[in-house]
Amino acid sequence: EDQVTQSPEALRLQEGESSSLNCSYTVSGLRGLFWYRQDPGKGPEFLFTLYSAGEEKEKERLKATLTKKESFLHITAPKPEDSATYLCAVRSNTGNQFYFGTGTSLTVIP
Amino acid sequence: DVKVTQSSRYLVKRTGEKVFLECVQDMDHENMFWYRQDPGLGLRLIYFSYDVKMKEKGDIPEGYSVSREKKERFSLILESASTNQTSMYLCASSSPGHGGGELFFGEGSRLTVL
């Protein structure tokens, strides 16, 4: 069964303190792994798509990496405006469905 | 930019009422989805549609129905609202020909059933 697990559930960082969020997945043939950012009371905002192990993508202070079993979202020198919930999702190559993790709630303290 | 618009941000309904949630996308995407999001449970798929008048059940379709009469519009219907349907409802669209087929979400509709 396709499954996504994110850790930790919550993370508090001081401004400038770099860290990583983890997304472990089980999927019958990976079509894509997706990272989203969600602010309170709003819909998720698309960040990255990764397709194959070894791939990396960057956007400002965020960098996403992918292995055959997990993905990491690295946050370098975070700022308070990076505070949000980060969601990971996978899509298998056998269907149209996306499978979401429950997210990591990130708080960056000034 | 892709825009997915949900008709209502906040709704309050009474038990037994019929509820319509409307979603419109402006990017000619083939696929549209309805999710509900609850604390600790993440996003759960209710229904999705890969073409006009086509629909498929997701993980939690009970108590819901959908309608897709036009490509850009996907409606979620609660025939008789119940308190356990109080939730955040998220509409999304995607296209196999757009990037990696990633989902683009609306702002969400927060439904409270009293």
Image: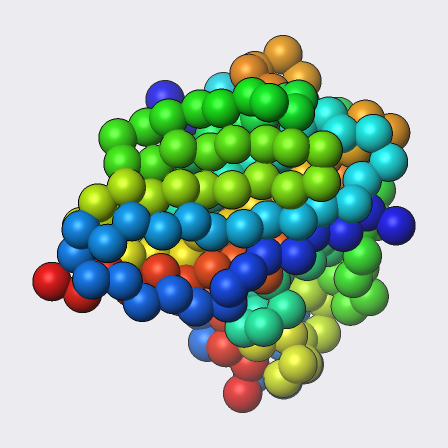
Viewer-closest of A55 and A93: A55
Q: Is residue B111 left or right of residue B15?
A: left
Residue drawn at 71 percent across, 40 percent down: A69
Q: Is residue A100 above or below residue A74?
A: below
Residue B54 percent coordinates (x, y): 81, 33
Q: Is residue A4 left or right of residue A1?
A: left
* Quadrant of the rendered image containing residue B71: top right
Instruction: Name the residue furthest top.
Output: B97
Residue drawn at 66 percent across, 57 percent down: A5
Residue drawn at 17 percent across, 56 percent down: A15
Instruction: Name the residue furthest bottom.
Output: B114
Q: Is residue B33 left or right of residue A17?
A: right
Q: Quadrant of the C terminus of chain A?
A: bottom left
Viewer-closest of B95 and A87: A87
Residue drawn at 26 percent across, 30 percent down: A60
Residue B96 percent coordinates (x, y): 67, 18
Q: Is residue B60 above or below residue A56?
A: below
User: Is residue B85 visible to the viewer in this orientation of the structure?
Assistant: yes
Viewer-closest of A25 and B7: A25
Residue A76 percent coordinates (x, y): 28, 41
Q: How is the image coloured?
A: rainbow
Residue B101 percent coordinates (x, y): 62, 23
